[in-house]
Image (cartoon, grey):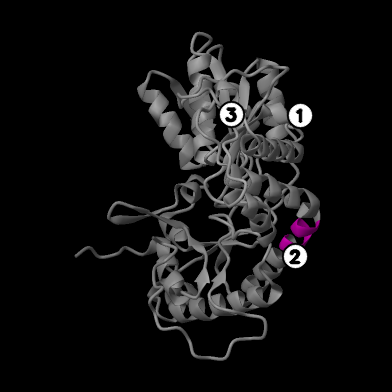
Amino acid sequence: MAETLGMNITQSKEPLPAGVTLPIYMDNHATTPLDPRVLEAMMPYLTGIFGNAASRNHSFGWEAERATDKAREQVAKIIGASAKEIIFTSGATESNNLAIKGIAEMYRERGNHIITQVTEHKAVLDTCKKLEKQGYRVTYLPVQADGLIDIEDLKRAMDDQTILVSIMYANNEIGVVQPIREIGKLCHEKGVLFHTDAVQAVGKIPVNVIDDNIDVLSLSGHKIYGPKGVGALYVRRRNPRVQIAEQINGGGHERGMRSGTLNVPGIVGLGAAVEICQNEMAAEAVREVELRDYLRAKLEAALDYTQVNGNMDHHLPGNLNISFIYVEGESLLMGINDIAVSSGSACTSATLEPSYVLKSLGLGDDVAHSSIRFGIGRFNTKEEVDYVADKIISVVQHLRELSPLYEMVKEGIDLTKIEWAAH
């Protein structure tokens, strides 16, 4: 809801700069547009090649199976796995559920303790909360002010009942990349399985399940210019061999871990998407970092009282989460209704709550509410970044003119010393 507020406001009639078409999409952590090359790869499997990959008696089924086998190889390659370790799912939410619930159920006799962190995606947090109701113990590690966990906290949290650690590779809101290799190494030393939600990382930064000591990994197609409704789960086959109890019962597809007819066109699209990422990721990362740093510099040069959230030394290339203090995020979104970005608020029931991720960094409600997440992606241009920066600067300056708090701060008044009268 927060991302669409204000879309009915009359748009400016000023002439647009060359190379800019409205609206501008800069919310690539929420989802990405389908790359035309991915659609091209998918098209034959939406029309003529329509067989069921589990039909082993005729050429229609064989062709579909060949296509899914190729995609399995493509997905495996980008994370340094083998094709037999890839399970196709409907997306990362299902992959996270299958990994966490499936391991919890399979290893119940060994222990009942799971460790995760407070800034995980809801697909992990809500899954863990469900398991708590079933008698599992879950430790939610805090994060430091820069969004990174403290490895010492993880060490202290582990005990002889710990069976699983689930820590996301990169955060969807603040773009912070966790010390995954170190976490995985510690887990292996302790004989604990390590799962990572790598949705925001795979295809954007190098990920290798062997080097990173990862046992189970979730990924999704629609975050990397592939189709929605398809994802994968990597499940390690040796050192250690990971076993997962199926959560969807049926025909025993996907090595008995995930029953259901395979989404062949989607899987082909996922395979094509990761192959493009494999070939272009390094150059794309350099370009996105340049655009992100350019956007940041332009905003910080023109506006005071801004704050970048999250550790920028361990960070996704295209992510910038920045607070415009003394500006309400929802008002800012309404003022830039021709630009798609996300605010630091989440819609919950009838109230706008500040993002739990930003609150976990120690940000106050006012600062969290003033935050905007920019997700720069493959199809964004420098001209678009210029337009976005200029528009943000103009709207922030206008909103601050209307803000008595900003005026008081500029006059040197310490807001913490003011006793506000209650009415």
Find the distance from the CA under tag 2 to the CA under tag 1.
Answer: 30 Å
Image quadrant in which you'd find residue 134: top left
Q: Which residue is mark 2?
A: 290
Q: Is residue 196 magenta?
A: no
Q: Residues within 10 Å of mark 1 (few under 14, many from 20)?
A: some
Circle 3 SS class: helix
Circle 1 SS class: loop
Q: Which residue is mark 1?
A: 210
Image quadrant in which you'd find residue 267: top right
In the foreground, 6 or 83:
83
Q: Quadrant of the C terminus?
A: bottom left
Q: Which residue is mark 3?
A: 153
Amino acid carrying label 2: it is Glu
User: Which residue is the extreme one toward the front?
Assistant: 58
Amino acid carrying label 3: it is Asp
Could you say where residue 336 lies in the image, as x and y percent from the top left? 48, 75
Q: Which residues are magenta?
A: 283-288
Q: Earlier in the sequence, mark 3 or mark 1?
A: 3
What residue appears at the point 68 percent right and 24 percent down from the top-left corner? 236
Q: Nearer the viewer, mark 2 or mark 3?
A: 2
Q: Earlier in the sequence, mark 2 or mark 1?
A: 1
Could you say where residue 35 lies in the image, as x and y percent from the top left? 65, 59
